[in-house]
Amino acid sequence: MGKIAIIGGGAAGYFLAANLGKELGKDTVIFEQAQMPLQKVRISGGGRCNVTHACFDPLDLVEFYPRGKKELLSVFYQFQPGDTMAWYDDRGVELKIEDDNRIFPVSNSSMSIIECLLKEVEKNKVRVNFSDGVKSINKVEDGFEIETASGIHRFENVVVTTGSTPKFWKIIKNLGHKIISPVPSLFTFNCKDPRIEGLMGISFDQVDVKIKSEKLESEGPLLITHWGFSGPGILRLSAWGALALNERGYKFDAEINFIQQSKEDVIELLNSKKNQDAKKSIYKYNPFDFPKRFWVSILQYCKINENLVFADLSKKQIEQIAKELTAAEYSINGKSTFKDEFVTAGGVDLKEVNFQTMESKLVSNLFFAGEVLNIDAITGGFNFQACWSEAYIISNKLKEIY
């Protein structure tokens, strides 16, 4: 009988195997249904791998998790982003902190992380079974009986690191665990509107976004895409509003302040332009820091004549422009997945897991790590950090057992 079965060859599964040491490693098997491991690590951050985030206080760190905030506090007190950086640095992978506090390999390649994990797992002599998906898990007297594509296997401990996989959640449910129904967490907003038509690629450094009907608001960079709105500001809002927006069928109104100024401030600025730049063409002179194409689009939407100069602007026109820049309402109709980095809210009920050890409270010697749990975060390396931390805790617990 083997000692440890790790089900899932992703970030959490490999980080766990990399931390077991040789004694436990040689009695450990990773079961992975795909032909290659670490697929999400490979594509994360546009292929650069956003390893973690430069937030080193657990009390601050948990604020980035819409689900799992309370439970992760004890986890991050045991292993946080500073520990992650040290772990990779000790193994020759140099990391860097970018201006927005996201952390990447200096190489700008996810292969630096993948090769490190593969090397550590191989060093620990952990066996990896590719194309060997798990069909069922049964609790038996001295451990677990696992049926996979390659046959029946028996292990003393099972660690589930399968990610957000509905098929596997059924297996966990059969073991007695409650599964919170999954809904998408990180997604972009679909919007067809004349104000943004043909403006794909235009970005804004900082905007405020509100969904008044749900009392949700967020700030951050925004990107206009061919399907609507994306960018960190939108993704953050989608994470916090995952459940509520799912219930609405992803149909709602979003209010956007593109310049993070008040309507009154914009009115004052445009009135000053009537005096200071009275003879300047409104269409040719954009008084704001966003791209001129968006300014022209707003003027056209407000039906302002192309031949007007600033002195010609009426009080009503100024108020209309100010509203479009600071409190414009856009009808959202649907969502799109953010690149290939699909994240869900949902999974194993957190009340049924001991977060000091990541062990099931219902089934002894059964552990969980990663997105199989009802934990998710905004974009920026936070989801990976939860994987690293949870896996590290499990490795320590298993070392205690043996």
Image (spheres, rainbow, N blue to C red):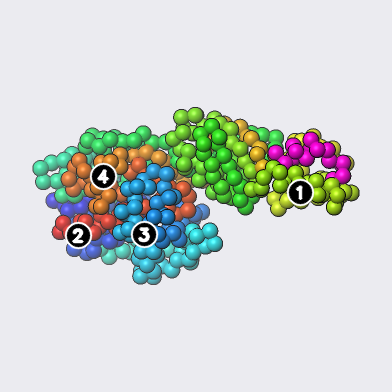
In the image, the segment drawn in magenta is 308-323
Name the spot of residue 2 as percent of width and height, x first. Answer: 16, 52
> Along the polypeptide, which appears first: circle 4 or circle 1?
1
Position of residue 191 measured from the top left corner of the image (x, y, whole percent):
61, 35
Above or below: residue 321 compared with residue 99:
above
Assess whether mark 2 and mark 1 are in contact (beta carbons under 8 angstroms). Answer: no
Q: Amino acid at mark 4?
A: Val
Mark 2 and mark 3 lie on one chain; the one further toward the N terminus is 3
Gap in Å between the C-alphas at discs 1 and 2?
A: 65 Å
For marks 1 and 3 on the same chain, the one whose residue lies earlier in the sequence = 3
Residue located at (35% from left, 70% from top): 90
Q: CA distance from mark 3 to mark 4?
A: 20 Å
According to the image, label 2 marks what residue?
A: 399
**Residue kind at label 1, given as amino acid type:** Leu
Name the residue type under label 3: Gln
Label pair 2/3, CB-CB below 8 angstroms = no
Distance, label 1 to label 3, CA atoms, is: 46 Å
* Residue nearest the observer in this picture, 337 or 79: 79
Task: Estimate the spatial distance between the alpha carbons at disc 2 and disc 4, rounded to whole Å.
Answer: 19 Å
Q: Spot the residue most to the left.
A: 141
